Amino acid sequence: GYERGAFTGAHNPNKGIFRAADGGTLLLDEVSEMAPHLQAKFLRVLQEKEVTPLGGSKPVPVDVRVIATSNRYMMDEVKAGRFREDLYYRLNIVQLTIPPLRERLGDIPALSRHLLSRIAKQPGLRDLGITDAAMELLVSYDWPGNVRQLQNVLFRAAVLCEGDALTIGDFPQVASKTAPRSIPDAANT
């Protein structure tokens, strides 16, 4: 954040993300992409529990829970020198490893139905069903982009769908890249 007058164009103060999240949670998506000079500053904020806005003269205390995500194995990033080891240990209090979607094929039907219900709430869109054949197609795809890719594929299909249910024809980009598989039983995965 910064104070009014901290630089040209700073007409109003800006809290910054830590002060805005004070008393709550801050999600840092893809923390492994953080530049080394920012890693040092971030570590200091976590250790000292305070920030000093640009143009400010006094540190401001912050109480923030941090959730950091990465699609990389962070210890590999530490060993390669791309991520600070001290910051890794500061962040790695509770580690959750979520397997990629291709390893959780039984989740695709429930995820798809959930995402379609969220998509239906978008202006101009409606509730849509999905045929069994279309669901089998989704389950047979490897999803290199994980849930975000699934959501985008479903959104595109929902926008272009002319019927009341999504069919294989609504997923041409998936159909051209898959080999048929059957839907795994969610209870057995």
Image (cartoon, helix red, strand yellow):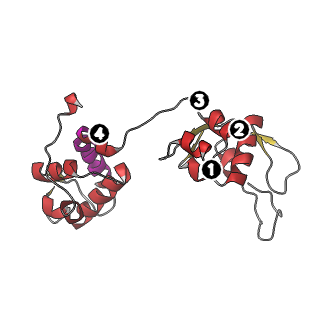
User: Circle 2 sits in a helix, a strand or a loop, which is it?
Assistant: helix
Q: Tell me, yes or no, whether the two marked residues, 3 and 1, touch with CB atoms within 8 Å.
A: no
Whichever of labels 4 and 1 marks the residue nearer the N terminus, that label is 1
Question: Badge 3 is on which residue?
Answer: 93
Residue on which disc 1 sits? 82
Q: Position of residue 163 (x, y in %)?
A: 13, 62
Task: Tell me which amino acid carries mark 2.
Answer: Leu
Using the image, tell me which numbered label, if any, was put on residue 46: 2
* Residue 87 seen in this snapshot: yes
> Callout 3: 10 Å neighbours few (<14), some, many (20+)?
few
In the rendering, at what x and y percent does residue 143 appear?
30, 52
Locate residue 102: give its quadrant: top left
- Distance between mark 4 and mark 1 Cα atoms: 30 Å
Q: Callout 4, which amino acid?
A: Arg
Instruction: Answer whether labels 4 and 3 touch (C-beta < 8 Å).
Output: no
Q: Please, what secondary structure does the residue beneath circle 1 have?
A: loop
Image quadrant in which the N terminus is located: bottom right
Question: How busy is the neighbourhood of tag 4: few (under 14 within 10 Å), some, or many (20 plus)?
Answer: some
User: Residue at the front extreme?
Assistant: 80
In the image, residue 60 lies in the stretch drawn in magenta = no
Residue furthest to the bottom in view is 8
Locate residue 25, reporting x and y percent.
59, 39
In the picture, which quadrant includes the C terminus? top left
Q: Secondary structure at mark 4?
A: loop
